[in-house]
Amino acid sequence: MDPKHYKLEFENDQVRVTRVRFGAHEGAPLHEHQLTRIILYVTEAKTRVTSADGKVEETPHKAGDIVYGGAAKHSEINTLDHPIEVIVTELKY
């Protein structure tokens, strides 16, 4: 986990909660999510997500949006001119 962008907020045997902050036009290289996760958008966000097979998707969200994510391998970048913040809760079951 990249400490510049990811901060572990809480973890037990059932969940892991991580705060993710990307500055303007910052992102994460190719990485893998092995657990089911719930994502809460703290701020407005617009990211460009590129899957391991090269498929690109633009994903805009409003502050307060909550989305479900399954296992995935992708890279992502904040396409906005300001920082974004999300809370990711991974389910360990």
Image (cartoon, rainbow, N blue to C red):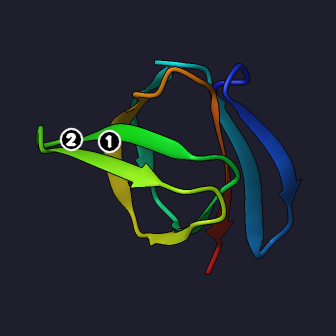
Q: Residue at x 40, y 50 (%)?
A: 60
Q: Indicate left or right for 93 with 12 as reference.
A: left
Where is mark 2, residue-wise? 52
Q: Residue at x 74, y 60 (%)?
A: 16
Q: Tell me the element at label 2.
A: loop
* Rendering coords of residue 32 (x, y %): 41, 46
Q: Is residue 93 above or below residue 13?
A: below
* Rendering coords of residue 24 (x, y %): 54, 19
* Rendering coords of residue 13 (x, y %): 81, 71
Q: Residue at x 48, y 55 (%)?
A: 61
**Image quadrant occupied by the C terminus:** bottom right
* Rendered image quadrant of residue 49: top left
* Rendering coords of residue 44 (x, y %): 58, 47
Q: Tell me the element at label 1.
A: strand
Indicate which disc, 1 or 2, sits on the residue closer to the N terminus: 2
Q: Given the current orientation, which residue lies at the most extreme bottom position?
A: 93
What is the distance, in whole Å, between disc 1 and disc 2 at their CAs? 5 Å
Q: Residue 74, labelled with which disc?
A: 1
Q: Residue at x 59, y 24 (%)?
A: 82
- CB atoms of marks 1 and 2 within 8 Å: yes
- Asked whether residue 21 is in view, the answer is yes
Q: Residue 4, labelled with which disc?
A: none
